[in-house]
Image: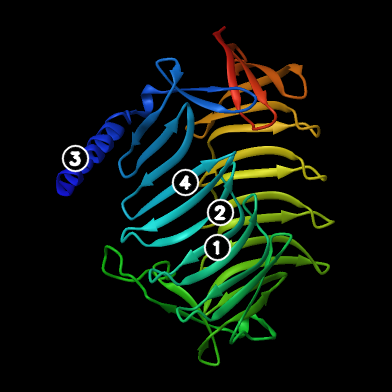
Amino acid sequence: MMQAKKIKYLKFVIFFISQFFSSQTIISFYDVTKYQDEDSEYILYNNEKYTGKYILTSDTVKTVTSVKNGIIYNIEEIGPNYKSIIVLKNEKSYKEVYNKEGNLVSEGLLISEEKQGKWKEYYSSGKIKSVEFYSLDKKIGKWKYYDIEGKISKTIVFKNELPYPKLSGMNGRLLEMSTLDLRYENCKQNLKNTVSNNHDDCDFVYYYNNLKYTGYAISKDEIYFIEHGYALFYKKIINNQVIEYSQVNNKLQKSGCYLKYGLFGEIKVRGNYRNNHKSGDWIEYYDLGTIKSKKRYFYDKPTDWWFYYSRAGDNIKIEIYSNNKLETIGKPVYELKNSKYFDVSTIFYDAITNKPLYQKKERHFIKNGYVYSLEYKDL
């Protein structure tokens, strides 16, 4: 009798689970629309708040977004060598990244898609690799790095986003770059089965007293930090003040984060380089820290949308680039402003003929940054 009850209960559980999952609709990303108000962004399907999942697939990545009553609560991204899971709640989100073996490699909080607070990275064994701190993607505080045994191997203190590393075996003196022994290692042969004369296919490794160098080295007004033989970044200093900082590759080419500072230590420009070429997003600031412009480059060439702002923060001009050329110019006009939102009407012109092309009217919500389209018309 008891066995029969158990079987009946198990059948009920299986039926309930099957019904639950069958009710979880799965549709394409292109089947949903978004609606935004001053409080939230909603996912709509057939003009109703959607509950279920929608999928977006590219050549190498599949993204599955879970929605309940129009609100996104989970995003799963699956790539060839990783999987990330983002859980969203109250305008904040928590992100976990796993490697292809399913091991957790990093985790932390996101606010508006930017890293915030404490982030942790892990070795594949599960042991802690580093503890990092952010303020809306900006590096702050004291970072700690651990070896595989769990001992602290390095610390970096960030002051005004400038790194000040400290690790064992670090040379305490500031050496001239010319005193270091530059060696070319791990050279790769090219298609002609030879190594290039300028050693582009080699790692540039710096030695001192026959050991891979760790410490600072100066060349003119630039101070490089080198770790275990590889250059990581430089600071350009004039009158004892840092005016420029950039990550570098081992060939001393700018690669990674770039910062330019003003006379009072304020950040004037923030961008990224790739092998000495401007790439990605670049932001220029006014003296008090408000944004002056947002631009995007691809290997030094302008691309996508560029935005220009007044000191008060209003968007005063838009430039749209295609195939490295300026094609369209937008001239925004603010029509309505209140404590909750502002409406902007923008007319876009042909960059060469100055002929009006189309007009867009949008509502920008101040609280969450959402943008809602109000009107579009060709001119």
> Could you tell me which residue is drawn at 45 percent across and 31 percent down?
68
Up-down relation of residue 342 to residue 266 (above or below): above
Of circles 3 and 1, which is in front? 3
> Could you tell me which residue is drawn at 78 percent across and 45 percent down?
289
Q: Amino acid at mark 3?
A: Lys
Mark with earlier residue (4, 1): 4
Quadrant in the picture for the C terminus: top right
| Mark number, residue 46 | none
| Mark number, residue 8 | 3
Q: Amino acid at mark 4?
A: Ile
Instruction: Report whether residue 112 is seen.
Output: yes
Residue to which mark 1 is pinned: 253
Mark with earlier residue (4, 2): 4
Q: In terms of secondary structure, where does tag 4 sit?
A: strand
Q: In terms of secondary structure, where does tag 1 sit?
A: loop
Is the residue under label 2 in contact with that under label 1 (CB below 8 Å)? Answer: yes
Number of residues whose C-alpha sits closer than 10 Å to that of mark 1, classed few (under 14), some (14–19) or many (20 or more): some
Up-down relation of residue 283 to residue 101 (above or below): above
Pick the front one: 318 or 37? 37
Residue to which mark 4 is pinned: 86
Mark with earlier residue (3, 4): 3
Residue 53, image x, y percentages = 37, 32
Q: Is residue 44 left or right of residue 233?
A: left
- C-alpha gap between disc 4 and disc 1: 35 Å
> Could you tell me which residue is drawn at 23 percent across and 35 percent down?
15
